[in-house]
Image (cartoon, grey):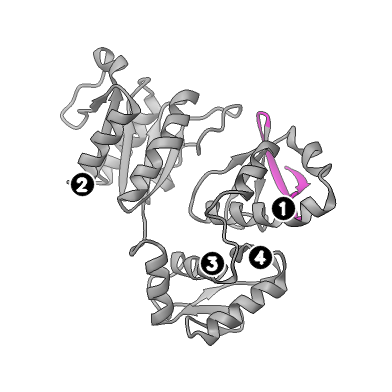
Amino acid sequence: MIKKRCLFCDEIVPTKPEGDYDQYLGCSCSPDGSYSLHRDSYESINSLPHPKKRSMLHIISAYLREQTDRDEAVVLSANDLETIVNTPTIPVTIEDKGIRLLQYLYRHSDRAGESVVIHPLSSNYNLTYSPNLQELVYIIDKLRNEQLIIREGTSFQLTEQGWREAVASAGGKKLKPCTILIANDGDLSQEWQGRILPIVEQYGYLPRLLTHATATTPHGEKYSLELIADSKLIIADATGQSPEVYFAAGYALGLSIPVIWSMNSRDEDTLNVKIQEIRPMIWNSAEELISILQQRLNS
């Protein structure tokens, strides 16, 4: 496996080629996962003026860390950097950055007082979108003084008050993992990614889009039975008659995970699997699909 330097956290880590992309494995931007960077982006990013790099790259690292920590697949190129940095949800104030640390501890614990190890701190200041370790330490001390967290060496705990703050900032409850299965179709993937996933999240789910993607079209995560088994809900779109969608959704049904089936009307007459458990909701447009899903998720 080839090793390369991550352009955002500066660590040298294993990479895996995926068509026109390189997948970075286990760097500080995604310690327990990976992200993919378009290979044509290296020259553009390396040629950025130093002040631009200093103001931008740590934000990209933090964005990658947060998204992959939430089990979101991230595929980016140099053209995406400005958009990410200027996203309104990127925290700017110390208070908002502190909330990001509370949310991280919340995602990694089941209750107030449960310990979460963060070590070493020098590789984790992207948890708060901070440009350096000094700011992270300041944020930690501030949260301790506000009695929102307890720190014992490398072990961190949310206090009862910190837990409530984290719950409130996360919309009142933890998002439940939800897997969305679609065929390997670029247009379909963009439609779901841009319009459908935000709707699903509004109903308390953390949606992950899985396609049976080839290496050259990494629109979503590749199928993972582990991710499916961890899900609380499966949305399976049979548009395109993908055997992988049927297999993965069938695996979920075998685990007694609820499955919502959907299909674009263009394929309605070609549905070749007609059993009691597979009765897809038929949709003609993204607006109609959104309306149908809202009705089902409300029930």
For marks 3 and 4 on the same chain, the one whose residue lies earlier in the sequence: 3
Q: Is residue 115 left or right of residue 12?
A: left
Q: Is residue 113 above or below residue 38?
A: below
> At 77% from the left edge and 56% from the top edge, which residue is drawn?
54
Spatial distance from mark 2 to mark 3, Cα to Cα?
Answer: 31 Å
Q: Nearer the viewer, residue 155 or 140?
A: 140
Please give the label number shown on residue 298.
2
* Residue with the mark numbered 3: 96
Q: Nearer the viewer, mark 2 or mark 3?
A: 3
Q: In the current view of this chain or complex, which residue is farthest to the top?
A: 269
Do the numbered discs 2 and 4 sit on residues whose CB atoms are within 8 Å?
no
Q: Is residue 90 left or right of residue 254?
A: right
Q: Position of residue 64 (x, y in %)?
A: 60, 51
* Residue with the mark numbered 4: 130
Q: Which residues are magenta?
A: 1-20
For marks 2 and 4 on the same chain, the one whose residue lies earlier in the sequence: 4
Q: Is residue 218 above or below residue 100?
A: above
